[in-house]
Image (cartoon, rainbow, N blue to C red):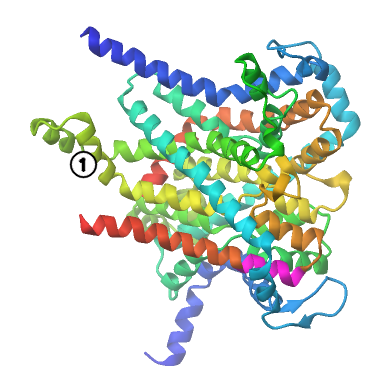
Amino acid sequence: MTRSRLRGLALHAALVLALLVFLFPFVWTIVMASNTTADIYRFPPKFTFGGHFGDNVRHVLDNVAFFQSMANTAIVAVSTTLLVLFFDSLAAFTFAKFRFPGRNALFVILLATMLLPAQLAAVPQFQTMAILGWVGSLKALIIPGAANAFGIFWMRQYFRNSIHDELVEAATLDGCGFFGTYWHVALPSARPALAFLGIFTFVGSWNDYMWPLIVLTDPDHVTLQVALSTLNRAHGVDYSMVMTGALLAMIPLVIVFAVFARQFIKGATEGAVRG
Amino acid sequence: MTATAGRKRIWSYWRFYLALSPFYVLFAVFGLYPMLSTIVLAFQRWDGLSARRFTGLDNFAFLIKDPTFWQALENTVVLFLMSTVPTLVLALVLAVMLQSAVRFTNVYRIAYFIPNVTSLVAMAIFFSSIFSTNFGLVNAALRSLGIPQQDWLGQPWGIKIAISTMIVWQWVGYNTLIYLAGLQAIPKEQYEAAKVDGAGAVRTFFSITLPQLRPVVLFTVVMSTIGGLQTFTEPQVMVGNSGGTGQSGMTVVLFFYRAAFLDNDYGYAAAIALSIFALVLLFTAINWRIFRERGENR
């Protein structure tokens, strides 16, 4: 009995060690963001939180249009997420519950698109944006990402397993049209799957880097990731300030994740096994 | 049924086609059309201003003679191996440990996953800071142990270690969760049968756990391959557009980005993009083959 208790203790010790390793970069970012750069340059380095966070935030705001780029990122991430949730779930519901000519062919095309790397389209896509007059505009980030194959595939799996055909038939008999059935029957039943897809999309959009770097040409109208890399490039010697910017850029994501974490983890693990 | 009746029936499905249309319209405009243009562009020379000129296979001929391309290819594969192998092994170990733990499992899962939902650029800056020569945490730790400091981001192998450390840190938790879900789907009876047969923990792991987990492992390998072959943000932020010392942080996507958007060599960039696509297909096929064949020979 003592042996199994010992093993349990060793197990948790190892798991806690892994947890500390995973969380350490966040702690160290806060340490750097709350001290002066001189403190960080010292050897041995200062391991405690300092009182300079306010100064560092002010320096960040002096050097990049931080709030503007955070607002840009939020606009892009929120609108992309809402559009993806709507378009993907609508298409997924159609694939999952209705038969129509060409359904299988369309679905195979959908799956095939998932293998295509983004770089394959980047150059002509930039030309398209130039023709549409969207270079420098947030539309260039929102519209192309408003529906995606992964989300449709993901939601379709969910609808197939969670909604009975009889329920759809009953709703149709009750006079619910196709869209009414989607809105009143399918959507409310799909909350956990929507939560997962929503966070997944939000995080992906928040973190997108290469395309905004290419298409947002005006330095005052960039997203957070681009602003952060500019800050790093121009003021890399002032680590405290740069790490403060890095910390501020992570806060909204951590909040969103903290609120939905349980649902998200549940969705992520179920989907991996089923898919 | 007559042809007109058939046509009439197609029309009665318009709601479904309308519901599906957003994805296919967006894909046609922002996906398919640009991809086809990329294929055409790969056979042309174009700087974005002057007229396009057909040059046949010149871009590809130049590509296979370009040492930077081969360097980028090698770096990408080395970085992919240096990050994927430790990531998946560590994730499997953590998942097996998490499965045998009874308490706090949800706390562990959420904490392990956090690295995956953070700002990529912010964390690339963080990792370049801890690997910095004069005041990085890694060198501070080495110095306190009496080991001379290293110029991590100024040396080819140091750059690769810094980049792959970041990728491992970011992806272990994600893969742990997926393996854990796979482990929980294995029927308990199989373990009980193994116990009755007198199989030990190691034997059970290799003859039951690992074979049952094969589809999940395939999934994680394919996902890591597709992600790993497209590494861009980490090297771009950590060592810059040049790829750092000896171009050892130059990946194929960074190479593509430079050709297209810094050098305005669009035709050449299109040829690089096609080579990335070929690379993804090749690696996916290899993964598929390895895991499929092992499964069938059993």
Kindly indicate the quadrant of the structure image that contains residue A231: top right
Residue at (82, 59) in percent of width and height: A135
Residue B254: give x, y in percent of width and height: 69, 54
The span shown in magenta is B266-274
In the rendered image, the quadrant that contains the N terminus of chain A is top left
For the point 37% across and 54% down, the residue is A160
Q: Is residue A10 left or right of residue B11?
A: left
Q: Could you tell whether B71 is left or right of A197 in the image?
A: right
Dominant SS of magenta comes to: helix
Q: Quadrant of residue A260?
A: top right
Q: Which residue is mark 1?
A: B207
Classed neighbour count for the residue bearing mark 1: other residues with Cα under 10 Å, few (<14), some (14–19), many (≥20)? few
Residue A193 image offset from top left, x and y in percent: 47, 44
Q: Which residue is at the front of the view, B194 or A161?
A: B194
Is residue B228 or residue A88 the one in the foreground?
B228
Q: Quadrant of the rendered structure where residue A75 is?
A: top right
Tag 1: residue type?
Answer: Ser
Residue located farthest toward the left when viewing the structure as drawn = B197
Q: Give left or right: position of A98 versus A67.
A: left
